Amino acid sequence: MRGDLRAIDQHGQPSVTRAEPYYLPSGDEVALFEQCHARRLAVMLKGPTGCGKTRFLEHMAWRLQCPLVTISCHDDLTASDLIGRFLIRHDGTIWQDGPLTRAVREGAICYLDEVVEARQDTVVVLHPLTDYRRMLPIDKTGETIEAAAGFQLVVSYNPGYQHLLKDLKPSTRQRFVALDFEFPAGDREAAIIEREGGADRATARALVSLGHRLRGLRDRGLAEVPSTRLLIAAARLISSGISVRQACYSAVISPLSDDESLVGAMRDLVDATFV
């Protein structure tokens, strides 16, 4: 029996330790990741929003007994936010490591969620950590840190959500081993919804059927199709006593679109699924 996972957020605060994060494999992704970790290879998790990329990584950090540092990427994320900065205090100026630097020193897995949202000049600082050098230069202090044993860089990437002005450069992409994720197959997705959403099997299967129907609306202008995450949210509402239709309207339909015609079509699919 393995121990608890020690997770650390981007502000350096440890979260409450917890038991094994539930993850249901769909192929050989677990073995592939373990080999990448053993061989110090950076990994890119590719797949649509809400398909299980983050949960997979939490599960792998637990299996490997590695601290996990998670950084949510956004347009304003700077290199200093990752590496660190000098802080002025009443007793002088001190250097404070950023989350990436802490992960490098501690031998943690550093996870950049939706890395394409970060600016290109920020992403470039990752390059020396993704090849044979495995080092992090800190220009402001003149220090160069060699990555501790166990350090691994992992990023997530949603190819279907990107456009010409927001994508990873080929020089960055080719520094990672890519693991491709999709929404789980029907039986697996139903098992996940039943386990995570607390729903009975019939409800879980019906939610999967609804999800498949709604995903067919992508060609009709639906920017994002319903994720497994949304279906789990609906299952949790249903298991708490909310009516099936209201749970689906609130947890699945409304977050997807404000377009009246699309919302109407999706509500019709809910009514057709739960007769």
Image: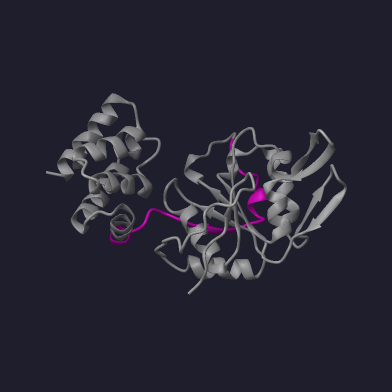
Judged left or right of residue 168, residue 144 is: right
The correct choice, above or below, for 262 with respect to 124 in the image is: above
| Residue 260: % across, % down | 28, 25
Query: What span is colored magenta in the figure?
Result: 166-188
Q: How is the image coloured?
A: one colour
The mark total stands at 0
Judged left or right of residue 55, residue 126 is: right
User: Quick one: which residue is furthest to the right in this view?
Assistant: 142
User: Quick one: which residue is furthest to the bottom in this view?
Assistant: 1
Front residue of 123/243: it is 243
Name the quadrant of the C terminus. Answer: top left
| Residue 28: % across, % down | 47, 69
Front residue of 195/33: it is 195
User: Quick one: which residue is furthest to the front in this view?
Assistant: 91
| Residue 31: % across, % down | 52, 71
Please report the residue visible at 27 percent of the width from the left and 44 percent of the height from the top: 237
Please report the residue visible at 31 percent of the width from the left and 54 percent of the height from the top: 193
Judged left or right of residue 215, residue 209 is: left
User: Is 172 a magenta residue?
Assistant: yes
User: Quick one: which residue is furthest to the left in this view?
Assistant: 275
The correct choice, above or below, for 61 with respect to 50 in the image is: below
| Residue 223: % across, % down | 40, 35
Please report the residue visible at 72 percent of the width from the left and 56 percent of the height from the top: 104
Front residue of 224/247: it is 247
User: Is 198 a magenta residue?
Assistant: no
- Report which quarter residue 11 is drawn in: top right
